[in-house]
Amino acid sequence: MMNKMQLRVCAKIENDGFVRMCATAFLVPLSLSMDTLMEIKTVLAEAVVNAIIHAYDEHDDAYVDIMMMYDQRQIVMEIKDYGCGIEDINKARVPLYTSKAHLERSGMGMTIMETFCDEFEIESHKNFGTHIRMVKYLGKE
């Protein structure tokens, strides 16, 4: 049986650190290596920050949902926003592409998520938001 955690945070950049701390505490029972833990914190931060920066335009009622599950074989992370959606997912997956160049974004978020995860899925609908699902297999520890 998988252990599960859910968080809902306001879509404010200052909540990124809180999400990473919660995830780290949640994963303590797995006794992960520092490398694996850093990869998980990095992909989670990329997904959450992308949702905060790209999904919403300063709406007070905007939020991001984060769900994590694990067992001895894998860690599953799902991040959902309910914002504007991604117009062209294929374009957004191209390294160095960013729709917010004026914010000095590097355009590497999706590339990082795909690189550090064993499974990466993204679904997005215009004006309904984006859902990212990432899986990290364990057993390499």
Image (cartoon, helix red, strand yellow):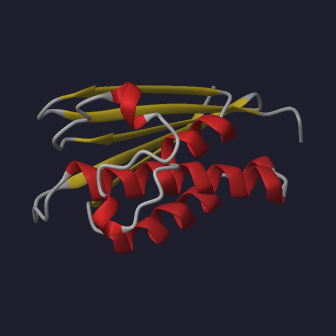
> Is residue 138 toward the left or the right of residue 70 in the image?
right
Whether 41 is drawn above or below 86: the answer is below
Task: Count the labels in the image.
Answer: 0
Foreground pick, 109 / 100: 100
Instruction: Give the farthest residue toward the right.
Output: 141
Q: Quadrant of the N terminus?
A: top right
Residue at 73% across, 54% down: 37
> In the displayed structure, does residue 36 sit left or right of residue 132?
right
Residue in front for this viewpoint, 35 or 22: 35
At which x and y percent is residue 36? Answer: 77, 49
Res. 33 image quadrant: bottom right
Quadrant assignment, res 23: bottom right
As drawn, is 4 to the left or to the right of 7? right
Residue in the image at 40% along x and 25% along y: 90
At x 39% / y 67%, what residue is drawn?
Answer: 104
Camera-side residue of 10 and 2: 10
> Can the viewer see residue 26 in this picture?
no
Q: Is residue 76 above or below residue 28?
A: above
Residue 48 in view in this figure? yes
Question: Residue 2, position in %: x, y?
Answer: 61, 30
At horizontal 60% and vertical 55% (from top left) the residue drawn is: 42
User: Where is residue 63 shown, x and y percent of the image?
Assistant: 23, 54
Judge by depth and name the residue closer to the eye, 69 or 41.
Answer: 41
